[in-house]
Amino acid sequence: GEDVMVIHSVEGPAYKRNLASRFARGKYLVFLDDDVSIGQYTLYHLWQFMEEHLKCGMQFCKILNMERRDIFDDCGSWLTKSGFLYARCENDKSDRGQYDSSDRILASKSATCIARPSAFRESGRFDPSYYILGEETDLCWRMWLKGWEVWYNPKAVSWHAFGTSLKPKVKHYTLSRIHFHGCKNYINLLCTNLGWKRLAITLPIHIACWLVASASYLLMGQWQRSWLILKGIWWNVINLRKTLQKRKRVQTHRAISDRELFRIVGYNPPLSYYLGRMYRYLTQCLHG
C-alpha cells in the first residue's frame, strides 16, 4: 500500500534504523528485526505502556528464543561498576515468570522495541559507528542522561531466531562482531556516557579485562581473536577526537548524575560472576 515504504541498505543496523526513522510519520517508532516474530497483542502493549508512562523514551519486549519458547533471549540489562553489562537472565535462561514485572533497565536488545520520537531525536539517534552490538545500549544510556527512562515490558513478547537452526550463531556471530565490534563498542560506550570521575576509575579496569582476554587467546593459540580485541582498543585510540566531540554533546546537558543512574539501573555482582563471565567469553565467545 501507499503507507508502506521499502528501503534497501547494506549498512549496519544502527544506520538502517536511523534511515527508516526519517521517513516514519507515526506517533511512535517501532523497531523490528527481520528475524523476530511478535505476539498478537505485542504492539498494543508497547503502545499502551508508552501512553501511560510519559517519561519512557524507549521500551523493550520480553524476548524469547524462537525454537525453545520457554528460554529467554533477553529481558534487559543493568550496568556494573566494571563497565560491562549484566544481562538479567544470564544465569537463569528459563522463563518461569521471574521477570513478569515491568522494570527500569539500562537497555536491552533492539530486535523488538519502541521509541518516543522526541526522545530518539533529542538523544542523537543510533550511532552508526557502532555498526552492530551495543548501539541500542549507547542510545538508551544517552536517553537516561537526557532525563528520559528506559523500560522492560513483559506483556509485550517477541521470539528471536538468533541462536537457532534458523539463524545459527556460527554463521552470524562472526569473529569480527564478537571481538572487534564487541571490544570497540564497549570502550566507546563508556568513554561517551560515563562522567569523568566514574570513567577514570572504570575505564582502566575495563581495558585491563580486554587485555587479559587478548593475552589468554594468544596463549590458547587463537591469535586472530587476540588481534581483533587489540584492534578494537586501537580503534578507540585513533578515533578519540570524534569520541570526545560526541562526549561533549552528551555530557553538556545531562540531567542525571552517574550516582543516581547507578542507583536506578546499576548492579553489583560478586567476583565469581566476573570470573565466570571471562571463562564463558574465552570458551564460548559470550560477552553479553
Image (cartoon, rainbow, N blue to C red):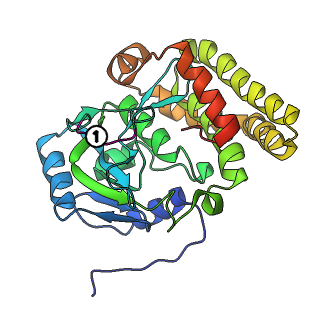
Residue found at x 26% / y 54%: 157
Residue that label 1 marks: 152
Q: Secondary structure at mark 1?
A: strand
Q: Position of residue 143 (x, y in %)?
A: 38, 37
Magenta stretch containing residue 86, yes or no?
Answer: no
Is 225 above or below relative to 273?
below
Q: Main secondary structure of the magenta part?
A: loop
Relative to 204, is 127 on the left or the right?
A: left
Q: Position of residue 71 (x, y in %)?
A: 37, 48
Q: Position of residue 244 (x, y in %)?
A: 64, 32
Relative to 202, is 252 on the left or the right?
A: left
Residue found at x 47% / y 17%: 269
Relative to 141, is 155 on the left or the right?
A: left
Residue found at x 41% / y 26%: 254
Crowd rating for badge 1 (residues with CA inside 10 Å; few <14, some 14–19, many 20+): many
Is 237 above or below relative to 260?
below
Q: Position of residue 141 (x, y in %)?
A: 43, 34
In which quadrant of the rendered image does the N terminus lie? bottom left
Residue found at x 18% / y 65%: 40
| Quarter location, residue 197 | top right
Q: Which residues are magenta?
A: 93-97
Is 249 above or below relative to 133?
above
